[in-house]
Image (cartoon, coloured by chain):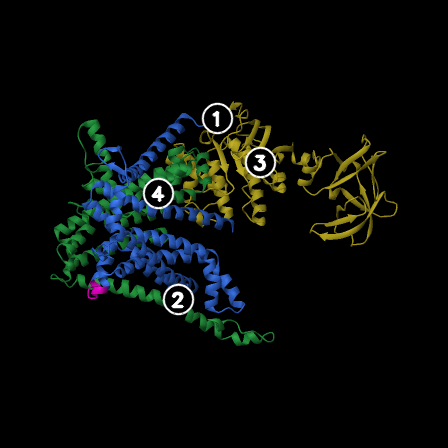
Amino acid sequence: MSAGGQDHGVTVRVEACAKTFADGTRALEPVTLDIARGETVVFLGPSGCGKTTMLRIIAGLEQPDAGGRVLFNGNDVTGVPIERRNIGMVFQSYALFPNMNVADNIGYGLKIRGVAGAERKARIAELIALTDIEGLERRRIDQLSGGQRQRVALARAVAVRPSALLLDEPLTALDAALRERLRVELNRLLRTLGVTTIYVTHDQAEAMALGDRIVVMRKGAIAQVGTPRDVYFAPANRFVAEFIGAANIVEAECTDGALALPGGRLPLANGAVGGKVFAMIRPEAVAIVAPDGAALSGRVESVSFVGDRQRLTVSGAAARPLLVDAANSLDLKAGDRIGLKVDPAAVRLLPGEGP
Amino acid sequence: MHGIGAPSPRTWGEGAQAQCTQPAMRLKTFLLLCLLPLAIIVIAFFLIPMALLVVVGARGPTGLSAYAAILLEPRYRATLVNTVLLAAATTVATLAIATVAGIFLQRHRFPGRAVLVAFLTFPLAFPGVVVGFMIILLAGRQGLIGEITLALFGDKQVWAYSMVGLFLGYLYFSIPRVILTIMAAVEKLDPSLEEAARALGAGPWAVQRDVVLPALMPAFVASGAIAFATAMGAFGTAFTLATDIDVLPMLIYSEFTLSFNFAIAAALSVGLGLVTWAVLALARSLAGDTVAAAG
Amino acid sequence: MKNLRERTIFAAQLAFTLLVAAFLVVPAVRSMLAGVTESYFLGIRSGFTLQWVAEVWERYDATILRSFAIALATLAVTLVVGVPAAYALYVRGGRLARTVEEIITLPLAIPGLAIALALLQTYQGFGAFRRSSLFILVGHVIFTMPFMVRSVMAVLAATDIRALDEGAASLGASAWRRFRDVIVPNARGGILAGSLMVVTLSLGEFNLTLMLSTPLTMTLPVGLADAYASMRLEVASAYTLVFFVMIIPLLVAMQMFAGWSAARGGRR
């Protein structure tokens, strides 16, 4: 949603959209999703999960299989070709026109719409200021750096005041440091614009930073839809738990409201039933305590200094080694015995499912 | 040549020392030997004859002015103009036809497409004489077009032996070449550029005008230059279609074989060679690739 | 879900392309038919016959055989001279190589007529040479050499032959051994492509050959011109049919080979 301003754009509804390609590949199982006006929704998942197909169906570059519909503001646009959907799209390769300079690229959509010269120039200038690329108006595309191209692509897509903004992995082509910086700028820009935005990425940090809601996808189907916090703290299944951030998945018997583990017992929240369960524990949710007298203990296998914390691999506590985050102030080394304590509320039970 | 290889080392390092100074010299000599036959052939049978041609062109009764004759003498100038116009018309028509057909074929898949492509490219290596014959069969006195117009309008049209026939002949051997080049270029186009234009609202014509055609420009220049140069120097087609057609290669031929006017023939040939070479060099500098006329 | 407009555009483009294809194919088919029909005027109704083909062979057998011989000889010369030269140019690189490449490619930029005149002028004094098939061979070699050289150089560049060459050198192989054992086997693709090209071009060469040949040393295309001018349509067509039969398999082979080697190259 926009920061303080109005929300712009259309509501987008994807209804039972599936996609099988001509060569038989099943890229998307039937998916239904509602996107609110002004909302930024991020499609997140590994390559091949169908997120780009989803985006292209909403854009109008692909047609869903029979029975699928795409609606903008309640109107069925499934049969409307992309050139008439009035969307703004940023491609992974930016797709800037090499035969035009920066200003002409940005103004292309306006030219097509018949906007008069003076008004066009003004709008181009507005966008150049917005995306912070003053001075580059006359440059040819091959003279721009990666970051500059990304901004031009964005300016071009936004120039026409689209009803929805679609971005296909816009930061993937950039190096890590640049990506981080541009992500912050992109976030600011999206908040300012307040237009309905659909963003595709495989980078979960990006998704969490930019999305109002995240749609985690896997093998052509939705694994979970939720706010970044929902998805992080309450993943719906093992795949989401492991894809978003680091996770320890512990498989154990639950007896008397606690997990029976090789290294001791782990109390669970009220209402936990008996039987075999899969529990997810984030590394930062595990506290280090003195080993003697602790309900759960283990041995440090390795210590990695990550910068703002230490990441430990602890064996013996659970069937598989646990990832545990510890503050830098703790002096730990391989071979140490430590005690582990986890707040029962931070242990999330997942439905049992295979890998 | 058995002994020139590696000496067998008796201990580690010994073999290397013996080899140290040998390979470099061996290689240079070898490379020289590789190039020598080519050099001899090219010098004896191309460079020297061409140089001689330039000299002979200036040794005729009118001397050096034979070279200027191509521009000054009205008959020669008319022929030159004819040839240039014909080559230019061929180039433009071929580019237009090949672009429409080439983009269509590259962008669509349908049953029979491969056969259609084969049909359009099989005349690729036909010599000009055969092309001339094809035109005779199409538009000559017993040609297909004559039969059709006779049946439809009662008047038999014979185009083969006029400029129209020659133009058709030039189209016949230019289209296959240019279509292949255009199709190859279309294949290399980045589809996301067209998608981006469409996303911005451009209709099909606008996409062609603003994205596709500009991207194909290098291919147009390269293949257009080849088509022009080939048409300028085309001889076999005109030879077969014979009669009164006035193009430069035919003029050169008749000056040599009929009038025994060797100096003029030489001068005209050199002139034609220069123009052809210049067009190709220009295209190469614009397109950055090696281009060549053939046939 | 193509709408009406898209369908109309498709149909119009298809019709246009079919028309152009017909322009190219129909005369060729007519010619092939005419070569085996009793009477061109009456058409297929008059029945099939091989008499015209027989007549062609009777008149032009020496010419056809000579064309084959020259094509093969041209191939031999371009192989022996061109392949080592291509290797040398590739290894040398630099400005010298580029200049040499430019020079040998010049014959393609200059009309065959001009080259033929030049050769005639230079060697008119060498009567026996000028009147022999060797003279034609020379012209063909000059004209086809750049295709062989470029084809081989392209494949050398594509397979990074330099690394293989250096590897063999590090094992002690001399320049000649390397050429024989490493370079040539790995350049097979380019050599084959170049060979097909050379043979096809030589068989079809007219502009040069017309001037270089004499009535006693005609080649197939020159014979064709003779037939078109003086023979009846059926004989001319039969002769053209013979030419097609010779050349089209070569063209198909070249296309197939190009497609096959492109697919292989892509997988590397």
Are both tags, 4 and 1, on one chain?
A: no
The residue wearing badge 1 is: A79
- The chain letter for the residue carrying disc 1 is A
SS at badge 4? helix
Determine contact: label 3, label 4, CB under 8 Å. Answer: no
Q: Which residue is mark 2?
A: B34
Please give the name of the residue rendered at 37% of the width and 57% of the height, measured from the top-left corner.
C148
Residue at which label 3 appears: A51
Amino acid under label 1? Gly
Give the percent coordinates (x, y) of residue A185.
56, 42
Element assignment for label 2: helix
The x and y percentages for residue A343 are 79, 39
Q: Amino acid at mark 4?
A: Thr
Residue for point 22% across, 34% down: C41
Which shade is chain B? green
Q: Residue at x 57, y 36 (%)?
A: A51
Q: Is residue C123 magenta?
A: yes
What range of the chain is rendered magenta?
C121-128
Question: What whole-number distance in Å separates the C-alpha atoms at marks 2 and 4?
Answer: 36 Å
In the picture, which chain is blue? C
